[in-house]
Amino acid sequence: MADNARARKLADRIQVVVAETLDRRIKDPRLGFVTITDARVTGDLREATVFYTVYGDEEERAASAAALESAKGILRSEVGRQTGVRFTPTLTFVPDALPDNARTIEDLLDKARAKDAEVRQVSTGKTYAGEADPYRKPGEEDDAEADDEDGAGA
C-alpha cells in the first residue's frame, strides 16, 4: 500500500499530464472546451478518477465524453511515460458536478435575496406593535414596586 501523500502527488501529476496531453496531442473534433478539474488515485495506485467539465450544452458534453473515452489509451500511455510508476493506473473520466451544484446554490441565493428585498419593502414605514423598547429597566421595576407599597400602606 502506498501512503496518501504519494497518491495525492500522483493524482496532481496525472491531472497536469492529462490536461497538457488533451491540449497538445489529442485532435479529436468532438472534444470541446474540456477542463480537467481534479484527479484522485486509489490508495494502491491502481485506479485514477479524472474529473472534468465541459463548456457547452448537453450535446457537446456527450460528444466530449465520447472523445475522452476514445482517447483513454493514449492518455494512459502518456501518464505512464511521464510519471514513471511501475503500474500505470487505469483512467476513469467522470463529469464534475461542481458547476451544476454552484449554479443551484446561486439560484437559491438569488431567491433568498428576492425574499429579503420583498420583506424589506413590506416593512418600510411600519412601526412596532408595542413600545419601542419593551424591556423593563432595573431602576423602573424598583420604582413601580415602591409606589405600590406606599399606596397600599396609606
Image (tube, helix red, strand yellow):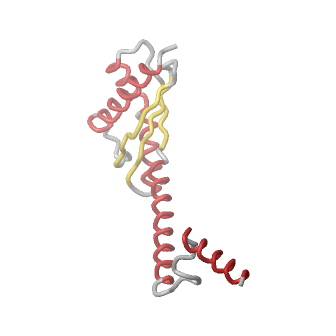
Q: Where does residue 136 sit, x and y in percent of width and height?
A: 58, 72
In the picture, residue 146 is in which quadrant? bottom right
- Outermost front residue: 154
Report the residue at 43% width, 33% height from top. Answer: 39
**Frontmost residue, 25 versus 118:** 118
**Frontmost residue, 117 versus 49:** 117
Q: Where does residue 84 sit, x and y in percent of width and height?
A: 35, 15
Report the residue at 34% width, 46% height from top. Answer: 29
Report the residue at 32% width, 21% height from top. Answer: 82
- Residue 97 sits above or below residue 50 on the image: below
**Frontmost residue, 101 versus 73:** 101
**Frontmost residue, 68 versus 88:** 88
Q: Where does residue 20 sit, x and y in percent of width and height?
A: 29, 34
**Quadrant into which the C terminus falls:** bottom right
- Residue 40 sits above or below residue 152 on the image: above
In the picture, residue 18 is in which quadrant? top left
Report the residue at 31% width, 33% height from top. Answer: 21
Count of marks placed on residues: 0
- Outermost bottom residue: 125
Is 36 on the left-hand or right-hand side of 148?
left
Is 74 on the left-hand or right-hand side of 20?
right
- Outermost left residue: 24
Q: Where does residue 99 sit, x and y in percent of width and height?
A: 44, 52
